[in-house]
Amino acid sequence: MIASTSSAMSSNVKKRLTKDSMMRLKAKFNGQIVYTKPIDQNPMTDADTRNTLRPHTIQHLLKLYALKHENLTKFMAIYQSSADLNHNFVFIWEFCSRGSLGDVINNIDIKLDWTFKASFLGDLIRGMKYLHNSLIQTHGYLNSQNCVIDSRWLLKVTNFGINRFRELQSLEISDSHDANELLWFAPELLRNNDPFLKGSQEADVYSFAIIIQEIVVRDKPYSTYANHLSTMDIIARIK
């Protein structure tokens, strides 16, 4: 599950193929297509031994690995890469071929009737209920890009439990693209210096409500305000 930099591991994680809107990279791991998510290494390792995972980090990764539910993507491994010093660890997740829920919602060529919409919401509820009752307890970064759709049109929640690894990273909103990530965050998190630091089940419910709006109206969060307010203005009002 936790792989070090070695020739064997390097042969397992092969070239990255494509990159989606959430900076997930598609790759091959042990001969199968997977999603990879780079994470800055500082919060995960000891300061004096950069390549050594902290004990509490290992415990958390083992909890992630133990999760098994049809509406959660499987956390498969973590890969330590020496090639990128800023993104020293790469999370390896189950791949879902139809992309993210956000991609599906915004694709006008895909017809979504109420049966489809209700199915997505049911999948999301089941996945989040399991996650909230697990040792992980919260997602911390729930949005429509972190809900992915597999070949059977089953919705699966992904990228859960990794917000704690961002704790030493400063949040710098440099443009509207960066700010868009915050549209799913609850007001109490936005008032923190780093809303990625610590999520809560209540904040996950807020994010879930935003996703309901996206599914029902097939538009981006707070779309009724987007014509006359910038993303930063919307976030300021949410706070």
Image (cartoon, rainbow, N blue to C red):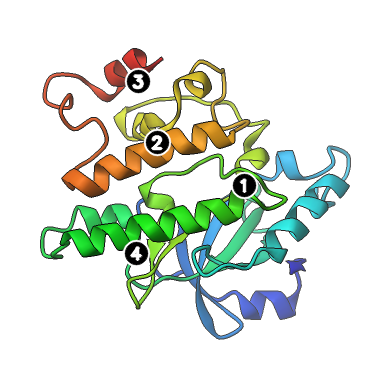
- Separation (CA) of disc 2 from disc 3: 10 Å
Identified by mark 3, the residue type is Ile
Q: Is residue 35 left or right of residue 8?
A: left
Identified by mark 1, the residue type is Ile
**Which is more toward the observer, 113 or 10?**
113
Mark 1 burial class by Cα count in 10 Å: few <14, some 14-19, many 20+:
many
Q: Which residue is mark 2?
A: 181
User: Who comes first in sequence, dot 2 or dot 3?
Assistant: 2
Callout 3: helix, strand or loop? helix
Q: Is residue 80 at all visible to an observer of this figure? A: no
Residue under the image location 64 percent in, 80 percent down: 11
Asked if 207 appears above or below 136 in the picture, the reply is above
Identify the disc placed on residue 235: 3
Q: Dots 1 and 4: beta carbons under 8 Å?
A: no
**Which is more toward the observer, 22 or 12?**
22
**Which is more toward the observer, 149 or 171?**
149
Callout 4: helix, strand or loop? loop
Residue under the image location 47 percent in, 44 percent down: 142
Q: Which residue is mark 1?
A: 162
- Separation (CA) of disc 2 from disc 1: 15 Å
**Which is more toward the observer, 153 or 36?**
153
What is the number of callouts on the image? 4
Q: Which residue is mark 4?
A: 99
Q: Dots 3 and 4: beta carbons under 8 Å?
A: no
Mark 3 burial class by Cα count in 10 Å: few <14, some 14-19, many 20+:
many
Identified by mark 2, the residue type is Glu
User: Who comes first in sequence, dot 3 or dot 1?
Assistant: 1
